[in-house]
């Protein structure tokens, strides 16, 4: 399943540009008008677009090359291999998205538990309402609003980028500037995705709280805290972890756009630049990487469920 | 069935608020020409004022042609009135003012008018995509869930595969290759990346319904398949399909805005996404022009919230446990 999905992602990468009218060399010429049309062929040759092989053979070569880790050369950063471009971008995205996802999962799930436990209170409905509204904001627009108020008006945070240029890479000051630059984009992703966790968790929790074993536990006079965390929350969190897989695609997508707004040098911003420069090899590797990352995250979620769900855990033994 | 469903929606406080917000936006979209003060892409007002030609007044004419008859002179004098074309250009990048309540953009277009007209495209793309995706998902889920067997295996396999391929990057990559720019390509792209979610959800609903007693009885009685599918299973899927419709419309609206914001839409179409695109390319943010980029996002958020509110109510209707005790 995992492998097949990767295979589908690869196939999308391969067939999509070939299904569309026009060819990349021409598209590039459109961008760089100073190049005379006679050079079209040499451009095609330079980027390996002069292939006269049948489509299926090209497809086979493409898959083999990908398996070998040969992803081609970037159009816009010629002659840099796209794999090198990725190597620079990936750590930024991983750090930003990893942190934001963990934060939003923890805060959202915690708030969801609380909102279900005290669902009659005004505070609970207000929290649910607030995050529902925030969740309806487009990610990039929330980013724009945060930049406007916190970076432009109040000047607390930098407007974009990931670090202060000119500081020694690896020095304390540099790390501090990285943190300083990372807070706003991370806040954008966290704020937008809390709502999803909160609502899923709240609804699961309400469902679980209506179960008979909770009533029995209450009747036995067990401490409420124990019922809340060990009896209710633990069972309610399972669908939330499964939901993780479903919503991860959205979060990753939102994170990409957030990077574009903040000019944060991760793969989202790379994708933005690649799209604008019609840098197809770079676009392809980014798409492939994102698909693979989501797959791996799904896999991790499955393992997490094994640990959390005794039925699966014991069944596996 | 649908009637009673709508009745319950109106009686629920949350969904009523949601329906009202959505209704207001739909009205704005329909009556955009009457609400917007200017056409969305106008950068000037042209007024034509009739100006009598002073050199051709009746007295002057009678002086020039003393022999002419008086009636003829009158006719001449009235027909030679001239019209003056008075062009008033809108200011560029103007702040909010009584003439332009949300200011103007870099080309002098009135931003409030753009916001009003943009409602049309944004709502249209959202709702049409939502409807289309839901219909496709209903068809696929009924076929795969009810028939089962190898048809089900194939459909659910592809659903699951497409499900893990992240939607937004897929949209961006497809949109980058598509040379045709416009509303229709965006709708198609949105549909391609959205269909797996509702299909998977609706399929499991079909499976649950299939094992219910009333369907089993019909099966045992030898009812026609079309009767079981359309009269017994489909009516019970309306609430969940409606929920999916609103969820998918919201995602579509956001997806459209995102694609256009990145510049992958047709930037000459007036929609909320393209207003944000122009705001970003013209540095509205760093010139403090909040009136340029705040309203379109708020509009998207309001419509999105209305969809979510309606869905809350649908959830509560179909899951009694979520109702207030």
Image (cartoon, coloured by chain):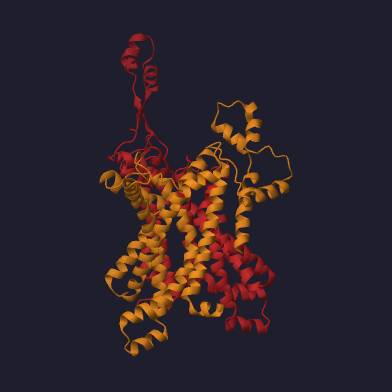
Chain colours: A orange, B red
Q: Which quadrant of the view contains residue B317?
A: bottom left
User: What x and y, as percent, mark residue B178?
Assistant: 58, 44
User: What x and y, as percent, mark residue A293?
Assistant: 52, 57
Residue B154 versus residue B27: which sits nearer the camera? Answer: B154
The residue lying furthest to the bottom in this view is A220
Q: Is residue B45 left or right of residue B229?
A: left
In the image, is residue B314 above or below residue B170?
A: below
In the image, is residue B80 above or below residue A261?
A: above
**Point 58% across, 36% down: residue:** A27
Does residue B68 appear anywhere in the picture? Answer: yes
User: What x and y, as percent, mark residue B97?
Assistant: 27, 39
**Point 56% across, 36% down: residue:** A79
Does residue B19 appear anywhere in the picture? Answer: no
Q: Is residue B62 left or right of residue A298?
A: left
Residue B231 versus residue B183: which sits nearer the camera? Answer: B183
User: What x and y, as percent, mark residue B40?
Assistant: 41, 40
Is the C terminus of chain B in the top left, top right, bottom left or bottom right quadrant?
A: bottom left
In the image, is residue B69 above or below residue B159?
A: above
């Amino acid at each position: 399943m995992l492998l097949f999905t990767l295979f589908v992602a690869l196939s999308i990468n391969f067939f999509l540009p070939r299904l569309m009218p026009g060819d990349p060399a021409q598209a590039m010429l459109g961008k760089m008008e100073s190049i005379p049309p006679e050079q079209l062929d040499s451009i095609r040759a330079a980027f390996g677009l002069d292939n006269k092989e049948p489509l299926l053979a090209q497809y086979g070569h493409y898959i083999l090359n990908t398996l070998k880790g040969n992803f081609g050369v970037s159009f816009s950063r010629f002659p840099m291999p796209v794999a090198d471009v990725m190597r620079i971008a990936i750590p930024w995205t991983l750090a930003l998205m990893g942190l934001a996802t963990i934060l939003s999962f923890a805060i959202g799930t915690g708030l969801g538990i609380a909102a279900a436990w005290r669902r009659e209170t005004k505070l609970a409905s207000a929290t649910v309402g607030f995050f529902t509204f925030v969740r309806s904001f487009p990610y990039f627009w929330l980013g724009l609003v945060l930049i406007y108020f916190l970076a432009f008006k109040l000047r607390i945070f930098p407007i974009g980028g990931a670090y202060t240029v000119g500081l020694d890479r690896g020095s304390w000051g540099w790390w501090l500037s990285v943190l300083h630059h990372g807070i706003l984009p991370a806040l954008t992703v966290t704020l937008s995705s809390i709502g999803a966790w909160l609502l899923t968790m709240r609804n699961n929790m309400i469902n679980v709280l209506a179960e008979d074993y909770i009533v029995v536990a209450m009747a036995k006079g067990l401490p409420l805290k124990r019922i809340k965390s060990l009896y209710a929350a633990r069972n309610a969190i399972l669908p939330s972890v499964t939901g993780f897989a479903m919503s991860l695609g959205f979060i990753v997508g939102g994170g990409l756009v957030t990077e574009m707004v903040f000019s944060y040098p991760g793969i989202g911003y790379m994708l933005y630049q690649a799209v604008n420069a019609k840098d197809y090899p770079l676009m392809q590797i980014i798409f492939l990487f994102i698909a693979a990352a989501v797959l791996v995250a799904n896999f991790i979620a499955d393992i997490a469920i094994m640990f959390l769900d005794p039925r699966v855990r014991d069944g596996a033994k | 069935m649908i009637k009673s469903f709508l009745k319950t929606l109106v009686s629920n406080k949350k969904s009523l608020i949601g329906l009202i917000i959505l209704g207001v936006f739909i009205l704005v979209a329909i009556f955009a020409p009457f609400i917007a003060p200017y056409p969305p892409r106008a950068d000037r007002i042209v007024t034509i004022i009739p100006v009598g030609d002073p050199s051709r007044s009746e007295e002057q004419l009678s002086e020039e042609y003393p022999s002419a008859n008086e009636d003829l002179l009158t006719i001449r004098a009235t027909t030679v009135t001239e019209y003056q074309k008075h062009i008033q250009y809108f200011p560029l990048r103007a702040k909010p003012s009584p003439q332009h309540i949300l200011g103007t953009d870099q080309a002098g277009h009135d931003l409030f008018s753009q916001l009003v007209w943009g409602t049309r495209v944004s709502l249209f793309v959202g709702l049409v995509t939502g409807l289309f995706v839901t219909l496709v998902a209903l068809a696929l889920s009924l076929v795969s869930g009810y028939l089962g067997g190898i048809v089900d295996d194939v459909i659910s396999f592809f659903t699951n595969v497409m499900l893990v391929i992240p939607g937004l990057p897929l949209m961006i990559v497809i949109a980058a290759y598509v040379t045709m720019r416009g509303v229709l390509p965006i709708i198609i792209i949105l549909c391609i990346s959205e269909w797996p979610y509702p299909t998977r959800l609706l399929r499991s609903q079909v499976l649950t319904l299939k094992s219910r007693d009333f369907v089993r009885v019909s099966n045992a009685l030898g009812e026609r398949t079309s009767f079981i599918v359309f009269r017994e299973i489909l009516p019970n899927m309306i609430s969940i399909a409606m929920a999916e419709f609103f969820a998918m419309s919201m995602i579509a609206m956001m997806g459209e805005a995102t694609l256009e914001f990145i510049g992958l839409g047709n930037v000459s179409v007036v929609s909320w996404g393209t207003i944000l695109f122009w705001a970003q390319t013209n540095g509205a943010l760093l010139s403090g022009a909040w009136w340029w980029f705040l309203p379109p996002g708020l509009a998207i958020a309001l419509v999105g919230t209305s969809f979510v509110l309606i869905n809350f109510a649908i959830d509560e209707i179909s899951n009694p446990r979520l109702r207030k005790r």
